[in-house]
Image (tube, coloured by chain):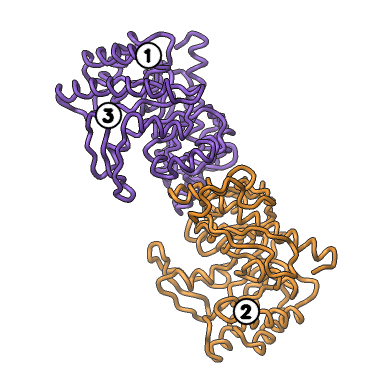
Chain colours: A purple, B orange
Amino acid sequence: MPIATKGAVKTVGTDDLEKLGASIILSNTYHLMLRPGEQVLKAAGGLHGLMNWQKPILTDSGGYQVLSLAPTREVRDDGVLFRSHLDGSEHLLTPERSQEVQEAIGSDLAMILDDLVDYPVTRERVIESVTRTTKWAKRQKNWFSKNASAGRELWGIVQGSTSSEFRRRAVEEIVGIDFDGYAHGGLSVGEERPETYELVSMVNEILPADKIRYFMGAGKPEEIVEYVRRGVDCFDCVLPTRNARHGTLYVWRHDDFSRPDFYEVYHAGNESHRLEFSPVDKTCDCLLCARYTRAYLRHLFSVEEPLALRLSTLHNICFYLRLMERIRGEIETGKL
Amino acid sequence: MPIATKGAVKTVGTDDLEKLGASIILSNTYHLMLRPGEQVLKAAGGLHGLMNWQKPILTDSGGYQVLSLAPTREVRDDGVLFRSHLDGSEHLLTPERSQEVQEAIGSDLAMILDDLVDYPVTRERVIESVTRTTKWAKRQKNWFSKNASAGRELWGIVQGSTSSEFRRRAVEEIVGIDFDGYAHGGLSVGEERPETYELVSMVNEILPADKIRYFMGAGKPEEIVEYVRRGVDCFDCVLPTRNARHGTLYVWRHDDFSRPDFYEVYHAGNESHRLEFSPVDKTCDCLLCARYTRAYLRHLFSVEEPLALRLSTLHNICFYLRLMERIRGEIETGKL
């Protein structure tokens, strides 16, 4: 899912996303509740109307941004009291409030507000996080059943830090409430990757087989392949778009995911590309690769032309969309 | 002519320019000689190859940028000695050197390096400027006749500050050398507009009727209409693209150029647009107006999304291209 944090994937429009074949985007409750706010969102016909995007939108709950952006915040049983990073104004983001804003956004897939933990963290804090997340999840399921527009889905999130004991308990509690989809939360935050893989496998084994599984905030291409092997269905990550803006692009080498070298990282601004009049990736069908050369992109980065960021973003989104297509192909043919 | 100073119109690609129907772009010798430099330009097949742009390119000589950007420069009879604004390296931009770089760029239309003056300026400096511009013009015509690739054109520039006496003298000298086109240089730099209009009329009356006339660095829409009335054929200006990036857009009200209110200036970021779910300009066929609303653009500016700059740039380029189309229509029907 390409990330349109504030109602736009940086440098690209929904016209571009349609052309790339994106089938869903992710946006952010915290940012949109502050700007443009619920009034504009409702009047626009939700974020679909505002962005002119007809395909699904998933929204995170705003919990992560409160922790990472708000200059002060206090996690309490009723919600998170925080000050806006924009004007210092005080807001109480309760579970119900997060759902109200997501309803105003009109996201097809809403995430529950959960109680996030840092990594590493004490056992006591993990217990508190799982317990509070379950309580909040129940309140949100309740709010959603009564208030959500038809067709919208609410997805639960499994917390528990790196403890398999508490992740197991979180699954039991969250699945007991019954959501439309389930997410792995609070992973890929500093722990070693083998540990992440094991926790994902363990949780996926006990999640309902007929519900979608979503890994929040992942990841590198080879990690995504590994998570899919272990039963994850969908992903969001700032890596492709953020890396693009730093001139770090992904280039296909082949699509045999059993070999770790199926892609390489391409540094678009490197001096070495100044005389390379070939596409960044000959096998790629994005605008950058179809029309422009490595030498041109290198020039655009060297003179800091904003077009460099746009073309690179289109390319990396294209790479990730094709990655998921290829993974689906492998699953259909039984290879993955 | 949309301005691709460093080899790109800021935020847009040549794919966008093709879709907008642009038939020519302008680029800049000073910037391109520093980055990417002649080696890359030549290897790329010129700027056409580097940008993948098949239609004409006009290049200015670099003289204006040396004056406005170089931290130190000394105008001498052999050329302008300056230090690069990038790394302080010393360069001598001679008339021949300017043409060499423009040949490497492969611009279809090259401008002569001229001796620019500030405004206001002493009579002595005007004399020096006109005299030196004529000397340099001869050297460049000579260089061009021997070295330029087939099909390329070299255009002369008329200097003379706001003195009709010296502009008249400049025309005689420059036309005597015989160029493929002629430009009004050193105008719209601080003098009152009625004075500019009179000087343009006077010069156009004595320029050859069968050669194109170009006003460098103009202007506002109503000024362009006025210059065309007085015999100017083509223009370049940073206004549409620079204004776009500051949220200042042009909106058609009607196309009767005899009335001064044929367009209005639209401030895209204004709070007043937050609930306006209509296009910026209903009569415009650009991507912004065809697909997005005033409310969305206002939101994009308010959260500083780079997409705002791109969509606004596409719109303003579209406005200026349609302006020129409408002016051509008026000329064809004898109204202008």
Discs 1 and 2 share one subunit: no
Q: Can residue A111 be seen here?
A: yes
- Residue ID at (61%, 53%): B315
Chain where mark 3 sits: A
Determine the secondary structure under disc 3.
loop
Judge left or right: residue A297 versus residue A159.
right
The chain containing the residue under callout 2 comes to B
**Which chain letter goes with mark 1?**
A
For label 2, the crowd category at 10 Å Cα-Cα, with few meaning under 14, some 14 to 19 and many 20 or more, is: few
> Mark 1 is on which residue type?
Asp
Q: Nearer the viewer, mark 1 or mark 3?
A: 1
Residue at (69, 61) in percent of width and height? B152
Where B263 falls versus A144 (above or below)?
Answer: below
Q: Amino acid at mark 2?
A: Arg
Mark 3 vs mark 2, CA separation in Å:
62 Å
Q: Which mark is residue A189?
A: 3
Residue in the picture at 50% in, 36% down:
A47
Q: Quadrant of the N terminus of chain B?
A: bottom right
User: What residue did someone put label 1 on?
Assistant: A178
The lab-note entry on whether marks 1 and 3 share a chain reads yes
Which amino acid is tagged 3?
Answer: Val
Residue denoted by label 2: B193
> Do the residues at pointers 3 and 2 share their chain?
no
